[in-house]
Amino acid sequence: MSHPRNAVVIGSGFGGLAAAIRLQSMGFATTILEKHDQPGGRARQIREKGYVFDAGPSLITAPSVLDSVFRAGGTTLAERLKLVPLDPYYRVHFHDGTWFDYSGDTEAMKAQMRKFEPRDADAYDKFIADAKPIHKAVMLDGLGASPFDSALGMLKFIPKAIRLKAVIPLYLNVSRYFRDFRHRFLFSFHPLFIGGNPFTSPSIYMMISYLEKAEGVWFTPGGMHSLVAAYADLFVEMGGTIRYGQEVRRIDVRDGRAVSVKTDSSEFPCDLVVSNADVGHTYRDLIDARNRRKYTDAKVAKFDQSMSCFLLYLGVKKKYDKLEHHTLILSERYKELVRDIFDRKVVPEDFSLYLHTPTRTDPSLAPDGCESIYVLAPVANNRSGVDWKTLAPVMTERILSSLESWGLEGLRENLDVLKVVTPDDFQHGLNSLDGNAFGLTPSLLQTGFLRPHNRSEDVDNLYLVGAGTHPGAGVPGVLLSAEAMEKCVRQDYGLDAAAA
């Protein structure tokens, strides 16, 4: 197969930017087509009245994965960005008024745990030791960065996964180590950060606890969008092109191969297409049904889409020392609230909240003496049938009232900026099927080989990156999906992997 000359990447989220950098480094003349007027997709930036908000991802883990993308472009993370370590990683406030500073410091973690349940503190080392080999399999042995498109490969991995107890539901597995409800939450909540249900997601996600401990949790001055800008700048410096305001309407397929990408105003002939768009949207809306034998409309309709988010972006004319950079405020219900979100698909009156307050670390992201606060409430996706035009104002008031009662005194009277994002915005603004916020749910039946592959199973020369494909959501996951895509391309076009 001859080396293709032109590649088109649909979308400039982290997966699309990483894919474009890797393609450009392999010699493809690569063009990114982006619907919006700035790069980032979910990781775009919002600016208003001097307040700066990251619209989506808000924390940096796995800097080694970030660095691998820069190295593919001939530079390094250290040369392009400054990283600031966070301590604690998160402060978690429980319904009974207790709180916990979650960090990578073993002794600090055990000292806090000992106050609630001494036996749990004694089990911490065993939990981390058992998470380490899962982390090794995914991150160090390359499972997450390799295309998982072989049934034989999955059959080979299953015995190892069973031996590591990586297929047991995470919360159930965590409960084997810890008795106190706080500790069971602290070591099982991470799937929620990537759209997963802790009670059904497999224990392969234990590796996140080890990953954070091994590589830390970080912030970059200017916010998460600084990383987006660094990747976009690198791509352009490499000779790549980003076309903004270009919403893709169709991937043209001839004789089973992707040959061009069409927007409202232009057509882009190409030899290779990488889609960073929502996987369901890519197959259902961008490719004619006659060219889809596996991912038919009926098949796409059966995807288990992840939960969504209800978001408030608050510019506040006041400082709140009670907030850490990352703060979680939990309702009394955990399992039942998760069931409401994932199974019942209803929006109850109670909620748990994640607050990102980057001005705790970088005051320049708001006017002097002010805070930029991003508030996230996990909610059911749009299969709930909720009328968000009616519910959004009600839920906004509930959340603001709850935050004031919790300790953010005078919040409403000090609001300078209030922006609201609902599942409808994910569905219509980001083309996310059912308004999902994290692609497909990372359940056991949508993991690895059972997830849509990085190499399209329906269309030659079409590749997939981002949250909906292998290995899954989260910034490290979507960056690894681009590395898996690169390996597919090198295999398909006979390119020398050593040249990567």
Image (cartoon, grey):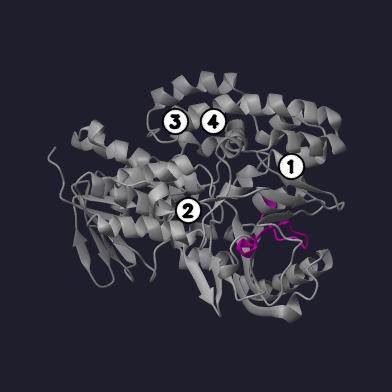
How crowded pointer 2 is (Cα within 10 Å; few <14, some 14-19, many 20+) is rated as some
Q: Which residue is mark 3?
A: 143
Asked if the residue at tag 2 contacts the one at tag 3, i.e. Cβ–Cβ closer than 8 Å, the answer is no
Q: Secondary structure at mark 3?
A: loop
Q: Which residues are magenta?
A: 343-360
Residue 274, image x, y percentages: 31, 50
Q: Secondary structure at mark 1?
A: helix
Q: Quadrant of residue 277?
A: bottom left
Task: Point out which mark residue 185 bears.
Answer: 1
The residue beneath circle 2 is 82
Q: Tell me the SS state at disc 2.
A: loop
In this rendered view, identify the residue nearer to me: 298 or 326: 326
Q: Is residue 269 left or right of residue 47?
A: left
Position of residue 263 measured from the top left corner of the image (x, y, whole percent): 28, 67
Residue density around tag 1, few if under 14, some if 14–19, many if 20 or more, within 10 Å: many
Residue at left offset 52%, top offset 18%: 159
* Cα–Cα gap, marks 2 and 1: 32 Å
Q: CA distance from mark 2 to mark 4?
A: 25 Å
Q: Is residue 357 magenta?
A: yes
Q: Earlier in the sequence, mark 3 or mark 2?
A: 2
Label annotation for residue 135: 4
- The three-letter code of the residue at mark 1 reads Phe
Amino acid type, label 4: His
Please name the amino acid that badge 3 sits on: Leu
Residue at image x 39%, y 57%? Answer: 230
For the residue carrying disc 4, how many other residues have a C-alpha within 10 Å: few (<14), some (14-19), or many (20+)?
Answer: many
